[in-house]
Image (cartoon, rainbow, N blue to C red):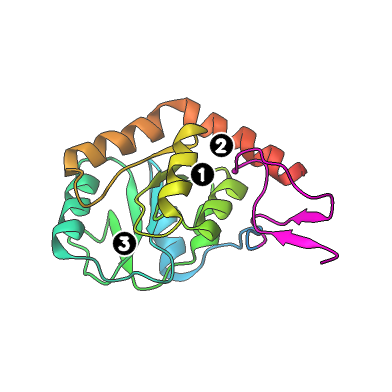
Amino acid sequence: AEVFIAEVDHILDYPRSMYPNTKLIGGSSASPSKPLDGDFKKFVDGSNKGIIVFTFGGAVVDLPPYISSKMLLAFQQLDLDVVWKVNITSPDPSRIMTSKWIPQNDLLGHEKTKLFISHCGKNGQYEALYHAVPILCLPIYGDQKYNSVRIKVKQLGLFADMRTASADELTSMIKQIVYDSKYAENMKKASRLYREL
């Protein structure tokens, strides 16, 4: 082959040897955000302390009840508002907005976004990196556990097993990422380097 194209980059990934004809295009789906509109704009504009964006990408909208109830318990212990891509009705729509679809990239690019909760698939990871939003990774399958460990090692966020972590443990991890400034600072530095390369 004349050129090898790899969906990785040196900011998120670990160093590795490459052939000279390898072109890295990690995060090719990441892009500038667009202004929010409709219900999303209204909800985010009304948030005083900031928001959490929670989605498992395009693949998962329905969660087992024991997981969704655990997440709701965790969110109710926070002073942040939540935009959550899930197929349930919010018990508190003034603080937790649920929807079967969300404008993920545009929410991540909003200045009020403090945290991204994700399964840590490649696209979401790079969008969070592009917009400098720390991540709480809740991996489900495939490369997501590897991606999640990488996020923790690079101190861009933390990860947990959502099947076994308690609501209190999830709340504690969210607070740690949001209120320990090292995660936001590390993500801002990584984002700046990523955009410059």
Q: Position of residue 19 (x, y in %)?
A: 79, 50
Tell which of 117 and 39 is nearer to you. Answer: 117
**Which comes before the other along the chain, label 3 or label 1?**
3
| Type of the residue with mark 2 | Met
Question: Which residue is located at x 31 percent, y 43 percent?
Answer: 160
Q: Which residues are magenta?
A: 1-28
Question: Which residue is located at x 63 percent, y 37 percent?
Answer: 190
Observer able to see residue 109: no
List the residue tagged with mark 3. Answer: 97
Measured in 3D between alpha carbons, the distance from the residue under mark 3 to the one under mark 1, in whole angstroms, is 19 Å
Left or right, 123 with respect to 102, comes to right
Residue 192: image quadrant is top right
Q: Position of residue 42 (x, y in %)?
A: 42, 62
Question: Which residue is located at x 33 percent, y 38 percent?
Answer: 174
- Secondary structure beneath dot 2 equals helix
140 inside magenta stretch: no
- Marks 3/1 in contact by CB < 8 Å: the verdict is no
Q: Looking at the image, is 90 positioned above or below residue 152? A: below
List the residue tagged with mark 1. Answer: 133
